[in-house]
Amino acid sequence: MGGRTRATLGLFVIAIETFATPASGIAASPGERWTASDIVTAPQVSDLAMSSDGKEVVYLLHTANLAANRPEFEIHLVTLADGKDRVIVRSGFLDRLRRIPGKNSWSVLADLGQGVQLYEVKSDGTRTELVRNPKTVLVGSADGADFGMAQMPPMQVGIASYDWSPDGKRLVYSQLEEERTAPRTLTGDAVREASARRRWSPHVRVSFFLRTNGEADAAIFDRPASDRIARYFGGMLAWDADYVEYGVQVDDNPTPAVQRYRWSFRTRHATPSGDSTALAMQDRIAGPGGGELEISGEGPEQRLVEKRPDGTSVDFGKAMISLSDWRSPGHWRAADGKFAVVAVKIIDEAKYALLRLDRGGKSRRIEVPESLSHCAFDAGLSRGACIREGLTYAPELVVVDPASGSVRSVAPISARHLRLERFAKVRRTWTNRFGYEAVGFVLYPRGYRPGRRYPAVIVTHGGDADERFITTEFQWSYPIQLLLDQGYIVLAVNDPYPAQSEQLQGALRSWTTCDGRVAPAEIQRLVWLNTVESYRSLVKQLDDEGLIDPAKLGIAGYSAGSQMVNVAVTQTSLFRAASSGDGGYLEPAAWRYQQCTYRAIYGGAPGDARARGNYTALVPSYRAAPGQAAVLQQMAEPRSGAVEFHEALIAAGVPAQISLYPGETPASDETHLFHIPSNRLAALQENVDWFDRWLGRGAGASNMQTPPSRRSSDASRHRRPQEQAFAVP
Amino acid sequence: MGGRTRATLGLFVIAIETFATPASGIAASPGERWTASDIVTAPQVSDLAMSSDGKEVVYLLHTANLAANRPEFEIHLVTLADGKDRVIVRSGFLDRLRRIPGKNSWSVLADLGQGVQLYEVKSDGTRTELVRNPKTVLVGSADGADFGMAQMPPMQVGIASYDWSPDGKRLVYSQLEEERTAPRTLTGDAVREASARRRWSPHVRVSFFLRTNGEADAAIFDRPASDRIARYFGGMLAWDADYVEYGVQVDDNPTPAVQRYRWSFRTRHATPSGDSTALAMQDRIAGPGGGELEISGEGPEQRLVEKRPDGTSVDFGKAMISLSDWRSPGHWRAADGKFAVVAVKIIDEAKYALLRLDRGGKSRRIEVPESLSHCAFDAGLSRGACIREGLTYAPELVVVDPASGSVRSVAPISARHLRLERFAKVRRTWTNRFGYEAVGFVLYPRGYRPGRRYPAVIVTHGGDADERFITTEFQWSYPIQLLLDQGYIVLAVNDPYPAQSEQLQGALRSWTTCDGRVAPAEIQRLVWLNTVESYRSLVKQLDDEGLIDPAKLGIAGYSAGSQMVNVAVTQTSLFRAASSGDGGYLEPAAWRYQQCTYRAIYGGAPGDARARGNYTALVPSYRAAPGQAAVLQQMAEPRSGAVEFHEALIAAGVPAQISLYPGETPASDETHLFHIPSNRLAALQENVDWFDRWLGRGAGASNMQTPPSRRSSDASRHRRPQEQAFAVP
């Protein structure tokens, strides 16, 4: 357990985390030095389940097998009585670990040599096949593969998703089926789609079946794999005593509209559900009174309300929260209806917790200073288990008492990561020139000394800068811990959070559904320029406080973050170096297959005279100019927009480097979230080198401690072929 | 031999082909009706060779195997004494049929079940392996294939090229070798290239070996497959008694510069040849006096001159010709140096012939009213053989007497094609508003009646509208013969020919070498707008002559022709319908990997403010506008520029359709020149339907004869899925 106090923590802690002033009270916990391998092998818990009797917990751990150079998955079983943790299944792929309702065993999608199939796993590790589809389909970023889950190598998949009815008597599962068809001429939209893809995909259908005890499996519906609700969200099932409800995608917008259907167990047919189409991702969360929980009201005034079946409402008070956030989902209702528990993200505190809601309208948080995530409960909702983790706090398994709110440590998830240095961190909230508030964290370097100015790097990815420990969806290939180790300040920064404002939400909705309600210039202002203004305000504050050296600023972000990086370096002169990961959105090259959102942002095609001003205002490659930040682009695929930006940087004489990381074979690609450990290690190192080159020692950061190991790697980087690619300014 | 007079033709005919006025003297030779299959199976002779004694001719025939749905190649042997033609080899791939100097046998690259290897073939059809590389490499438009020859399915290739020394004692051959390397990170230009490719390619080297009688094969040089001179032009070898000379590509411009090396037979090493680098494609043609033939002087004043080794020159007179044109190459010198024969294209007559050049400076044409192409001679240069063919004249084998210039028919190449209707044709030369002359042909419909106006379709591809019979490089998937059969006039039109003007040549050079000498606006004017002006002038003339209905004009072209189609329909309102084949050049999407030529045309990147006016002036997708011609795009690959144009047409409300024709499997593509017979048949039909829809019967062409077979296909097209794709204006 070593190194950290494991005591029962705050009972219904009211979040009064003091906003420490940056130059005072900054305390790190000393520990071993971080290496790139520690980042790549960081433990990521994706699922957690508790036995009905509350005595055992299983969790699904995703890490990396450095020797085999591939991802590694493990199912761990912990007996809560003694805190003993043992691995009961190990595999190259595991997903969706669940308790089988009414049984003392677990179900999981696993590749155990037969492609991905559905298995039952007992606590002693024995496995039984539950459903097997022998005609597997290749899935992944590869020639001939159905587009796959992020962060996985190409693999064979038989069963794509499953869900148990709450009583465990029914099971819905989906299987992938490849359609073998003769070559045919493509026309219209299909040609456009082919022009947007690097790898070709077969035609795949997703077929859903219902298994009921003692009956033959019944086919309930099937959809093309292009239906993202069917393919990646298991059809968004909802169970009732008489039917199972599923959703079907009715348009192809980035946030698609969904029509729901009810498949009756009696008639064995589906009928459209009474609801009209709604946007996807709107899950239904049960309140204690059997109604539905909603966030109502606008911005800072928004409240958590239960709309009960009898038409009445119960108000649980102000709540700047996201209910059952996909990063830590879950909601549970006590059988007697006295209370419910909901997993929430507390948006303006950038952390995850539980909310206990009593029938009478009382709401209480169950929380720790960092986050409680991935929670699960026993059958009676008398005991729960969660992962306690934070931005600088290595994950541990805790048990939660929903009655008292007490939280007790059980076992660390990774003993190694517990021994590593825990960097100091201060959460900040600030308001930008446009009047919007953003949340982020200042992370202080090893050996931080107040009164000195440090080079600093912003790391950003939408709203993912929060109290979780090394998630690839936030950190990607950015070496936060290595930069801190070497004397950089790291700023983990979020976009202004949409929940604070109807205007922001409206702009985002117009962007992703192209509803045409918000004008392109206003979308540009509220989405990208607004976040740039947040960077500017934060940098100004930290400069005023004497914390950072404003001449040595960097920024890093992938995907949505790469949009921000590319916009920030072409709209401001704040930064000297940037790392932009696997993104090419906003560039004209993507217009032809991004028309919905590009119309929203730009008002038309790049060649449309009326749209031209909007392109000139925002397109990064149109705005590349001498003197701007040096830009490294790390790519999983040679996206045309990214190459367009790189070429524009080179043409403008800006130092620029683009690196395409390889897949396992020439017939496959690295995935958007890198999955090949050797690529992850190399990409981390490439970023260290890049920021060192433009911000670091070469630029005279005299206050930085350079450990010998880093010096040697610093020398070796001069041999890297990537270094040949950029033009020195 | 039926249906056509086979007599000895014009002895040193001086080309006084009358320019028939369109409304008079138009005579077709009646024959059987054309079908789409007749176009797809049209015989294409690619190589021809003659035995040393002049008694036998072999030729390589490329046609289509409709039953097997693949290309078909045959080596035919004709004994000249009796005109008997028999097939001695049949295969899915044959290339580069040559006489082996000093032997009574032939050599050819052939796929006979071992991948493409080099064979010796005897007149009785027996084959011996000459060189075999067992480690073959996949070549073609397919995943994992080295980019291949046009018009072929993916195939295994061992030997890529070969050449005999003139005495037959030495042989140079090249083999392909795949480099197996661990996955590696790509940077810079390699990422840009990956972003431009639909299919991934392995790293392939082209290794050249010299075989000398009685010695072990010697490795002489090797190059990456990206060296187009090595990969596709066999290293551009030139033989001397003491060395063999080869060229190496030194830049990657569309017209690359080449450095030549001499590999000494004595030292067994290469040294740079005295010449500095020169542009590729400048072959050396021997004159009768042992010097080099050149075209000297400008435009209409240009003359054919031999520069002799002693520094003197011999002037053969005015010559608007292309020497040893790649479409019908060849040059031969008599052993006694009394005369030489050169295959030429007579540019302003759009035909191919031979030129006999005597040592004293006398020049005489050997020709027929159509073309003499693919010629070969016996060892003593006392007898030759050629293909006689024309735009409407099915090919036949002829023998040529270089002394007298007589031409005698020997055998038809395809009896079937000889029986088909031979449409009337008139060659025209005209000058456009910019002052440049163009050459083309008016092809008259079946049953043409003077005094009526006809709907008309321009078919164009650079300078390929000439006296050859159904070449895919000109006609592609355009159903010229079917349109003529149905009552359209077809205009086979060339760009203004560059040889007439230093200005035109300079603009083309600046375009393809980006030498920066000609300004972008002037390149646009002299290349694309100049050709558009030629269309305008021709249409005006034919309208004035009452020949065409100017409200029913179409235009069709692929590749370079697709550029012209896309420019013509967005710069003029001449056309009502267009078919644009497999091209996306000129669109901004291609900027990032076409920077050399795009800088020449546009002066910078699409986002560069200084370049913007040049983009607005020419980019087809920037100029799509309501009311312009309906555009069908037929694609072999989903090229981004083509999709960009299609999307712009749809956005502008222009009727548009894009069709992507499939490869053999999802892992391969149809090739730029289609090679799959079923695709070729479907693409021809799709064009017939498209022009019928916008120009034809539906639009009330009352004078058109509609045979019953066409009516039924006209009805059936309403069921074609392609028809769903376009928006009716």
Image: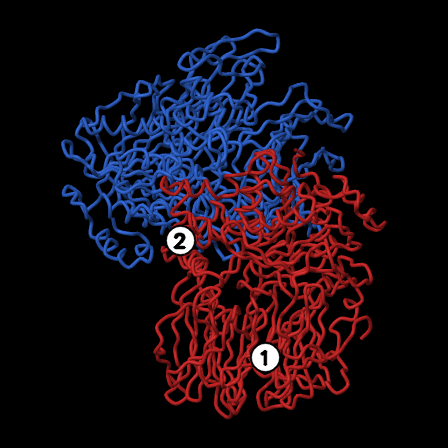
Chain colours: A red, B blue
Residue type at mark 2: give it.
Ser
Question: Callout 2: helix, strand or loop?
Answer: helix
| Label 1 residue SS | strand
* Camera-side mark, 1 or 2: 1
The span from disc 1 to disc 2 (Cα, nearest Å) is 44 Å
Residue A62: quarter of image = bottom right
Q: Is residue B272 left or right of residue B357?
A: right
| Residue at the image point whose x is 40% and y is 69% from the top | A258
How many residues crowd mark 2 within 10 Å: few (<14), some (14–19), many (20+)?
some
Q: Label 1 lies in what chain?
A: A
Residue B112, visible in the rendered structure: no
Q: Quick one: label 1, few (<14), some, or many (20+) residues within 10 Å?
A: many
Q: Quadrant of residue A53?
A: bottom right
Q: Which residue is mark 1?
A: A118
B25 lies above or below A10: above
* Residue at the disc numbered 2: B678
Residue found at the far right of this picture: A708
Q: Which mark is residue A532?
A: none
Position of residue B414 measured from the top left corner of the image (x, y, whole percent) = 38, 41
Residue at the location (43% across, 41% down)? Answer: B584
Which amino acid type is marked by label 1?
Leu
Q: Quadrant of the C terminus of chain A?
A: top right
**A510 vs B572: above or below:** below
Residue at point 50% right, 93% down?
A: A214
Q: Is residue A528 left or right of residue B622?
A: right
Residue A403 horizontal/vertical position (percent): 62, 86
Q: Measured along the vertical axis of the image, is residue B29 above or below residue B719?
A: above
